[in-house]
């Protein structure tokens, strides 16, 4: 049964300032248990050359994608001078924010051999990739400077609960709200989900960015016809026809 305890996003000092030490302690204990679980699974399933199939999936089933990723990223960041991690895995790790906490971060770093952990991380990243989720690479590079009104936005996986991790739940049509403007003080955006038509408000910061037209799937194009105003649909068709 998968842990339902959310990953706490701050360090112990900030948690104390916010009056949330109980939440931090609960998450910290789960982080430590996850790191220990990774070591146990590696010890039991590594034959000297390869990890047994299903090993990485098992730890994800127990602790979830977000916590496993948090622990793996922390493990590598705790071994900054270790050259046995591949450059692409290290770059992936560095993109994951771990709050600085010298007193505690080492406690939830896995202890297994770096070369084995490197393969473990590669397998984990492949699992996530197979979910087909959108990421920064599919978004406009200048998204932070764009007006979002009428644009298809990519919701960050960090915002979604893991049971909703799918591309259908990531794509939202921005319709109105102060958050559509990159310079407005307000951050709220009224959006419609292209997957199921749900309408709700998200904060501008909860989106990765504006999806590039070439990555818009056919199912999303059909949904857009339902939710866009006629002039928006016409403008998009003219734009895509000129590509």
Image (tube, helix red, strand yellow):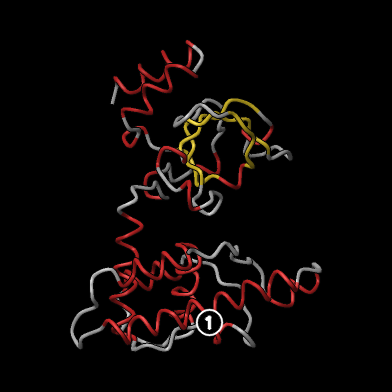
The residue labelled by disc 1 is: 108
For residue 117, above or below residue 144: below
Q: Judge left or right: residue 194 versus residue 242.
A: right
**Tag 1 secondary structure:** helix
The residue shown at (31%, 85%) is: 44
**Where 142 sits versus 223, above or below?**
below
Q: Is residue 81 above or below residue 173?
A: below
144 to the left or right of 24: left
Tell me if mark 1 has few (under 14), some (14-19) or many (20+) residues whose alpha carbon lies within 10 angstroms of its own: many
- Between 118 and 232, the one lying in front of the other is 118
- At which x and y percent is residue 133? 38, 48
Task: Kindly give the residue lying farthest to the top in the view shown.
Answer: 230
In the image, 235: left or right of 10?
A: left
Give residue 52's position: percent from left, percent from top.
23, 75
Q: How many marks?
A: 1
Picture residue at 68% right of the left edge, 72% below the top: 24
Quarter assignment of residue 219: top left
Depth order, front residue of 20/184: 20
Which residue is farthest front?
Answer: 1
Q: Residue furthest left?
A: 49
Whole-percent x, y for residue 94 in the image = 45, 70
Q: Residue at x 54, y 44 (%)?
A: 207
Q: Position of residue 138 (x, y in %)?
A: 37, 44
In this rendering, is residue 76 above or below 81?
A: above
Residue ID at (32%, 32%): 217
**Where is the C terminus found, in terms of image quarters?**
top left
């Amino acid at each position: 049964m998968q842990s339902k305890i959310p990953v706490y996003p701050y360090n112990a000092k900030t948690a104390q300032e916010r009056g949330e030490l109980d939440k931090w302690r609960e998450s910290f204990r789960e982080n430590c248990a996850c790191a220990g679980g990774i070591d146990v699974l590696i010890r039991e399933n590594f034959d000297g050359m390869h990890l047994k199939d299903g090993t990485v999936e098992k730890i994800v089933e127990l602790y979830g994608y977000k916590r496993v990723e948090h622990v793996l990223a922390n493990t590598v960041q705790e071994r900054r001078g270790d050259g046995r991690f591949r450059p692409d895995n290290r770059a992936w790790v560095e993109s994951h924010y771990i709050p600085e906490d010298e007193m505690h971060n080492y406690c939830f770093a896995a202890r297994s051999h770096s070369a084995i952990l490197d393969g473990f991380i590669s397998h984990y990243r492949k699992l996530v990739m197979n979910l087909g989720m959108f990421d920064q690479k599919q978004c406009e590079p200048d998204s932070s400077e764009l007006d979002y009104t009428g644009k298809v936005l990519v919701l960050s996986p960090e915002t979604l609960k893991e049971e909703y991790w799918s591309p259908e739940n990531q794509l939202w049509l921005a319709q109105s709200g102060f958050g559509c403007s990159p310079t407005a003080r307000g951050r709220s955006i009224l959006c419609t989900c292209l997957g199921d038509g749900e309408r709700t408000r998200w904060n501008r910061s909860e989106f990765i960015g504006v999806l590039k037209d070439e990555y818009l799937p056919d199912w999303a194009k059909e949904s857009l016809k339902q939710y866009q105003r006629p002039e928006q649909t016409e403008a998009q068709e003219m734009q895509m026809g000129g590509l």
